Amino acid sequence: MMFEALRNLFGGKGESAAPQATRPRLSAEAWPDALYAVGDIHGCLDPLRALEEQIFADAAEQGGEAWIVYLGDFVDRGPESAGVLDRLTARAPKNVRRICLTGNHETMMLDYLANPRADADWLQFGGMETLFSYGLSQAVITGPAKACRAALASHIPDEHVAFLEGLALSMSVPGAVFVHAGLRSGVPLDQQVEKDLLWIRTEFFNAEPEPGRLVVHGHTPGEAPIVAPGRICIDTGVFATGRLTGVRLFPDGEPRFFTGTSAASNQQGSFAP
């Protein structure tokens, strides 16, 4: 099944990434005029462009202020991680606010940049493709450590590193929480452990939903968005499927989904582990 192949491709190895203890947990006392979320991008720039254009157009129709919450995993696996970070750090259209959360792949990338090693797990889970997107070669990446550090410093913009370091862990509005992977049941939001927010799967899926709280997350890819009691998952495995999913949420009412695609990304699908 395609879904099982996606689960294998995006599996939970490498979970030893060190947490960033000082990352903010954002909250707002009220919803904006329009509120959107975008699933895992994984270096797929064309689907991101296509999805954002749809969201920008929809937001313009609503009027007022629009927030777009990006649920992390901007880098790795796809061919254009550097371009994705360029876009996310660029100025958004008028009255649109980008709110970018960290995913587990961002923390793995930062761990690698702090201590680059030719045998780093991150390189096997999409990190090599990310470094290629900055113009680095495999020979440099797997070569002497000193030369690799120098190449990283000269090829990866300081603005990108600062962006990754400043990403928030979560965003909440009354009745809804946005986070990369999910939450641990029974634990207040401000006491949730970072590793759970970035990596949790089974325990979150199997827990009873908390009344009055919707969790919007990515991290676990499927063929289509999942709307389940207490949660919405919008990771549709864009690197493998060519489909990047976004959603517009309402304080009351059904969500509205958007899909960004590109011919190039549709041709890249691979379900090899």
Image (tube, rainbow, N blue to C red):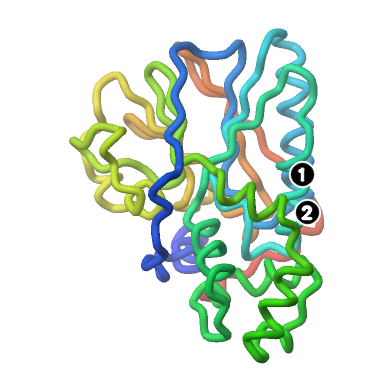
Relative image position of residue 173 (x, y in whole percent) = 44, 20
Circle number at residue 1: none
Above or below: residue 74 compared with residue 136:
above
Which one is nearer the viewer's eye here, 57 or 121? 121
- Is 228 positioned to the left or the right of 191 in the image? right
Q: Secondary structure at mark 2?
A: helix
Q: Residues within 10 Å of mark 2 (few under 14, many from 20)?
A: some
* Circle 1 Cα neighbour tier, 10 Å, few/some/many (<14 / 14–19 / ≥20): some
Which residue is at the front of the view, 244 or 170?
A: 170
Q: Is residue 193 left or right of residue 262?
A: left
Asked which secondary structure carries label 1, the reply is helix
Which residue lies under the disc numbered 1? 87
Q: Residue at x 72, y 37 (%)?
A: 51
Indicate the amino acid at tag 1: Arg
Quadrant assignment, res 17? bottom left
What is the x, y in percent for residue 253? 47, 13
Residue under numbered circle 2:
83
- Give the answer, above or below, for where 179 lies relative to 79: above
Identify the residue at image location x=81%, y=71%. Answer: 135
- Distance between mark 2 and mark 1 Cα atoms: 6 Å
Q: Identify the image quadrant of residue 69.
A: top right
